[in-house]
Image: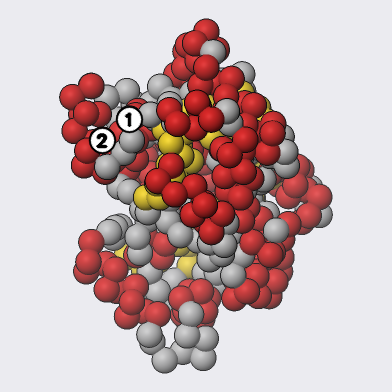
Amino acid sequence: MDKLDGSPSARIAIDAIPLLGRLTGVGHYIQQLVHQFGKLSPQYQYFYYYGYFSKRMLTGGKRIHGIKDLLSKMPLVDRSLRGFRGTVAKYHHAEFDLYFEPNFIPLEIKAKSIVTTVHDFSVQLFPEAHPKDRVHYFSKNFLSNVKRSTKIITDSDYTRIEAIDILRVPGDMITPIHLGLDHGLFKIYPREAQDRCRPELGLPEKFILFVGTREPRKNLARLVQAYTELPAPVQREFSLVLVGPRGWDDSDAAHAKKLGNRIMVLDYLDTKKLALVYNLASVLAYPSLYEGFGLPPIEAMACGCPVVASNAASLPEVCGDAAVYVDPNDALSIAGGIQRTLTDDSLRSNLIERGLRRAKNFTWEKTARETLKVFGQLLR
């Protein structure tokens, strides 16, 4: 495999603290990129920051979760893990050629260049959809620190345009790089594997699927309303299944309780089980109000599941011609898109074919290679 340009002795620091807990979006992003960095550019020296610097990448397991618990209890002025990240970083004397911050807000790690990934601007645009401590932390630290970056990466061109407007920085400072998929996991599975998964999770025979953290930005109240607008025969045939961890404001889930046994809620699933659920679903309904990228639609496409997505934010850029688009502010529009996808066999076949083709455009190798190009421009 060809290697990318850059000084062979370059020392690169990476904030890896999100790897210490149960992996969420940023954690998966770091894990996948670091894995690819080692293959594509092993000539660099990588140092991972966990409150200390290590050449080993730590991921998962009870021992690692225990470390995170310990860090969060240390007697610092700011007892939160966010405060820990920033406070301890100041006192390290090590200096690096490049520091990669994959989680919005660069720390005071000494480096000649800083590359920061800004995944979206939901905290700024939808503060009511975030916990108060997160909004306070971003208000205090985001704008002042992100502008210390030499380069900024965004997950989509949509977010790049937002960044130019919100951050007031030159356009050539920002590079949009789409996220990737693990195609070894997100794929069409044999029928036997699917059949084993259904009773294990207690899934209904036919269902409309939603995947994502249950919080207001995901628009679950309108999804539930849209479900109730479907014709009675469709509701009898298809249940509604919500998959994802409970968010900081799960009030939308209260609407779902009105559906009784027609709705099923599953919390955090490991990636393999999630891929199997996509395989079993009749359609993914993703009426999110705002996304910097939005991985679930692409994951669903790779698993042969047709997608109904909102026509908002980055989703049309990501999904291309492989989704039915709906107005996320209109429950009837959402219901109409779902009904068409469930009942029009020709449309379903077309969506599945286009989705499988579309998903092939997104790989973590491609994401890592484009990220390393940004590093190389600064390291040469």
Picture quarter containing residue 129? Answer: bottom right
Q: Residue furthest top?
A: 346
Which residue is denoted by mark 1 in the rendering? 205
Residue 145, image x, y percentages: 66, 67
The amino acid beneath tag 2 is Arg
* Residue 154 falls left or right of residue 354: right
Which residue is denoted by mark 2 in the rendering? 198
Compared with 130, 369 (above or below) is above
Q: Residues within 10 Å of mark 1 (few under 14, many from 20)?
A: few
Image quadrant in which the N terminus is located: top left
> Looking at the image, which is closer to me, 29 or 46?
29
The amino acid beneath tag 1 is Glu
Residue 210, image x, y percentages: 48, 41
Picture quarter containing residue 32? Answer: top left
Circle 1 SS class: loop
Answer with mark 1 or mark 2, whichever residue precedes in sequence.
2
Report the residue at 25% width, 29% height from top. 194
Compared with 36, 70 (above or below) is below
> Looking at the image, which is closer to me, 75 or 298?
298
State whether residue 2 appears in this view: no
Picture quarter containing residue 154? Answer: top right
